[in-house]
Amino acid sequence: MSYNTIEVQPLTSCIGAEIAGVDLSRELTDEQFGEVKDALVHNHVIFFRDQEVTPERQLTFAKRFGTPEVHPIVEGSNAHPELIEVLKPAGEGASFGTGWHTDNTFFEKPTLYTMLYGIDIPPVGGDTLWADMAAAYDALSDKMKELLDGLVAVHSASIAYDPRTTREKYEGKHSLKYKYSDVVETEVEHPLIRTHDISGRKCIYVNPMFTLRIKGMTKEESAPLLKFLYEFSTKPEFVCRFRWQPKSVAMWDNSCTQHYAMNDYVQYRRFMRRVTIGGDTRPV
C-alpha cells in the first residue's frame, strides 16, 4: 500500500508495522487518520515511537476509532475510568496480559482495538508479541477449514478472573485493582472462525485465556482441537515482537490478533497506560 502522509515500515511479512510522520500529541487531519487506520487494518498492529501522549490525548485519539470502554473487572484511573494504569513495581512479577489472549472476548460485543502507551520501560525485558490470526487461518489445510466452518466457541472471564482461583487479585496483592463483577460467570458464544469487518478476511477467533470450550462439546472433547489452534496460530512465522521504549505506542486490532506480554523483568519497574475501544457488533 502507498501512503501520502505517513511512513510505514513493516516488521514481518504478515503482521506489525512501525509508523513515522505522526505526532499523536496533536489532532490528526482526516487524511492522516484515515491512513493510520488503513495501516492498522493492513498490518493488524502498528507502533509509534517518541510520542508525547497525555491521558487526555490518548482518550481523544482513541475516540476517533470508537467508544472507549470501562473495564468491568480491572479498575481504571480515578480521573479517567477508561484508562487502565498498568503498573508493575520492581520486584513484583507481571500479572496482566502474561499469556496468549485476545482482549475481552468474554464481552458479547468484544473489544475492537487496544491502545497501549509505554511510560516507564525496563532497560531489558518486557517485550510484547502479537500473532496474526488471519495468516494462521490462511495456512490451515482446506480440510481443517472445512472442519472449523460453522463451529462456535464459548468464552468466559472465569479462567482469568474467577475469585476462587485468582483470589490474590481481589485481595490487593497486585498493583492493579480488581473488583468482582457478575460478568466473571457469564458465558458468551462467538464463531470459532470470524470474518474481519473491514478486510473481509477470515480469522481464527479462540484464545487460551478466555475460550472455555467448543459449543456442543465437553471441555475434554474440545481440548485437542483448541490446543492445536492455540499452538498453530502462535507459530513464529505468524508472530511479531516489539521492543518497548519510553514514549512508544502500540495499537492493535483484536479481531485478528492475539498478544502476549513477556514476564521477564521482575527486577525492574514498568508502567503503561491502556485504553480499549469497544466493538459495535457481535463477531460473525
Image (cartoon, rainbow, N blue to C red):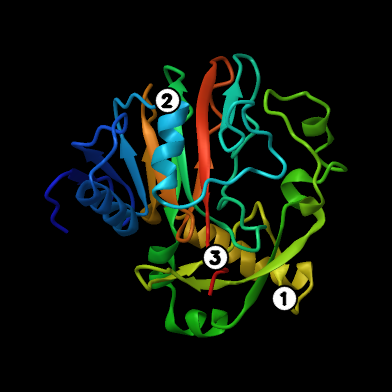
| Residue at mark 3 | 205
Identify the residue at horizontal 33%, vertical 39% (top origin).
Answer: 47
Q: Is residue 197 visible?
A: yes
| Residue at mark 2 | 54
Mark 3: amino acid: Tyr
Q: Is residue 233 above or below residue 158?
A: below
| Position of residue 39 in the picture relative to residue 190 (left or right) | left
| 3 and 1 marks in contact (CB < 8 Å) | no
| Residue at mark 1 | 215
Q: Is residue 162 above or below residue 203?
A: above
Question: Could you tell which of marks 2 and 3 lies nearer the N-terminus?
Answer: 2
Mark 1: amino acid: Lys
Question: Could you tell which of marks 1 and 2 lies nearer the N-terminus?
Answer: 2
Q: Position of residue 154 (x, y in %)?
A: 70, 67
For the residues labelled 1 and 2, the Cα–Cα distance comes to: 43 Å
Question: Could you tell which of marks 3 and 1 lies nearer the N-terminus?
Answer: 3
Q: Quadrant of residue 109?
A: bottom right
Mark 2: amino acid: Thr
Label 2 environment density (alpha carbons within 10 Å; few <14, some 14–19, many ≥20): few
| Position of residue 16 in the picture relative to residue 278 (left or right) | left
